[in-house]
Amino acid sequence: MEAAAQEKLATDVIKTSAGNLEITFIGHGTMMFKFGGKVIHIDPWTQQADYTKLPQAHLILLTHEHMDHLDLKALGMLRTEKTAVVCPQICTPQVTGAIVMHNGDIKTIEGLEVKAVPAYNIMHKRDNGQPFHPQGHGNGYIITFGDRNVYVAGDTENIPEMKQLKNIDIAFLPMNLPYTMTPEMVADAARAFQPKILYPYHYGETDTSRLVALLKDTKGIEVRIRSMK
């Protein structure tokens, strides 16, 4: 059953100094990494996959508390007694036994260096004036696999902290309005921190060809479009 589930999901393989990193694109804001015999799930959501057909996790990273990123049913399917769950403080009322990481924290978990970085809105706000994602609530994560740094941005805009990132090999940047970024904002961020490979994700009905066009003359950034609505 697991093999059948895997066949339906696109996978990219990235070579690192410590072996291959396998990225499985599940959809929306969720993906799965396999590296060195470990399985890492990002923001698993049962609306995107049948997690009974996917391998359970050694590590789960949660970016914030919204229901399309924090799904207790998915956590229950993927979590074992040994699974490390990492989340920001705002998720802890719902998630027991988690490792809390604040913006700027760096920890080694399951043999991987994980850094929590800011993820928030500046421009896009609710009708009451509150940002969809307030500063300090959510995390993006930079995970180091061998000599490769993978940045999963979470729900965020092209914030100053993002533009200051260095040595990012692979970046997942969200691209859906009104909650995160326009293609122009994603392109602006990418030009600033220069990821070698850029995957727009969590993009809903956004036209991904706009991002490709915006970055077509930007050397050193390969834009890869996968099914990540």
Image (cartoon, helix red, strand yellow):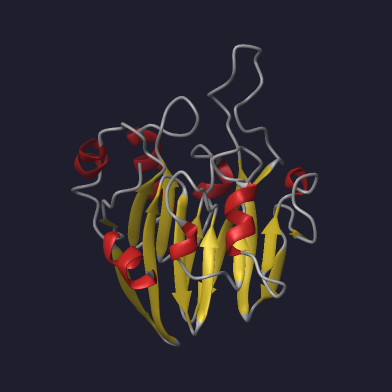
- In the picture, measured across the screen, residue 94 lies left or right of residue 161, that is right
Give how far across and how far down residue 163 sits, in percent. 50, 48
Q: In the image, is residue 115 above or below residue 203?
A: below
For the point 46% across and 43% down, the residue is 47
For the point 68% across and 75% down, the residue is 108
- In the picture, measured across the screen, residue 162 lies left or right of residue 211, that is right
Instruction: Work out which quarter of the rendered image holds the C terminus and state it.
Output: top left
Q: In the image, is residue 152 above or below residue 90?
A: below
For the point 20% across and 39% down, the residue is 209
Q: Nearer the viewer, residue 112 or 163?
A: 112
User: Dividing the picture into quarters, in which one does residue 138 lie?
Assistant: top right
Instruction: Work out which quarter of the rendered image holds the N terminus and state it.
Output: bottom left
Give how far across and how far down residue 102 sits, in percent. 74, 53
**Residue 167 seen:** no
- In the picture, measured across the screen, residue 115 lies left or right of residue 22, that is right
For the point 34% across and 42% down, the residue is 187
- In the picture, measured across the screen, residue 16 lies left or right of residue 36, that is left
